Image (tube, rainbow, N blue to C red):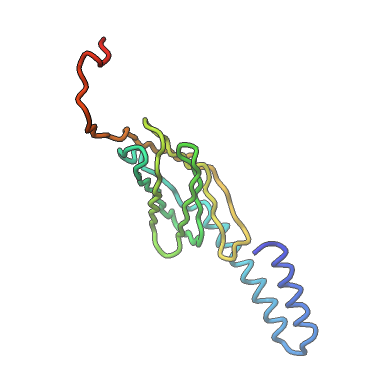
Amino acid sequence: MTLSGILQSVVFLTLFYTFINAGIGSLLVYKMLAAQVLSFLIWLVSRKRFTASVDEFAGVTEAGGECIVHIRLKKNGFCFLPLIVFRGEMDGVPFEAHTSLLFSSESEIAVKLRPKSCGLNKVRISSCTAQDMLRMFCARSAPELCSSVAVLPRYVDYIGPEVVPSFLPSE
């Protein structure tokens, strides 16, 4: 919900309150304001009460193969966040992972990536965004989590004419 959406709902509830001669209009206005305040307070308390970690080494794969990087979240006290988004990149290719910390004390995200180049590739998580229940407020942080993936070249089984050793390069 954006600021314009909040203003539109307040205007609607005010018109509802003005043109209907009953207490339901004021009740709706008070309930909406209470929901916004409660959502903000829960977000304010929860936004710094979780820790994220990744494995330093995510494994070995071949070029074009699939590797899995695990992002682990753990609550530190009261934390009630419905949407946490991690953004990062590997080999210049960006990725995004979503999770929540509502009723469980721990959460794990498995991000599947396909490395393009051989060598020791770095998986960098550059930002973490935590949003409140009504999605009005969000907090961004830069955790700078990093993991590595060893990428081997593909093994090609050569089937063809035999190569004479004199044609091979010598040292």
Identify which residue, 94 or 54, lies in the foreground: 94
Question: Residue at the location (49% across, 41% down)?
Answer: 93
Question: Residue at the location (64% across, 64% down)?
Answer: 1
x and y, in percent, of residue 145 in the image? 45, 40
Vertically, is 49 above or below 24?
A: above
Question: Residue at the location (52% across, 51% down)?
Answer: 48
**Dividing the picture into quarters, in which one does residue 59 lie?**
top left
Vertically, is 149 above or below 40?
A: above
The answer to whether 150 appears left or right of 125 in the picture is left
Vertically, is 160 above or below 14?
A: above
**Dividing the picture into quarters, in which one does residue 150 lie?**
top left
Q: Residue lying farthest bottom? A: 21
Q: Quadrant of the C terminus?
A: top left
Question: Residue at the location (68% across, 81% down)?
Answer: 27
x and y, in percent, of residue 111 in the image? 40, 49
Identify which residue, 136 or 24, lies in the foreground: 136
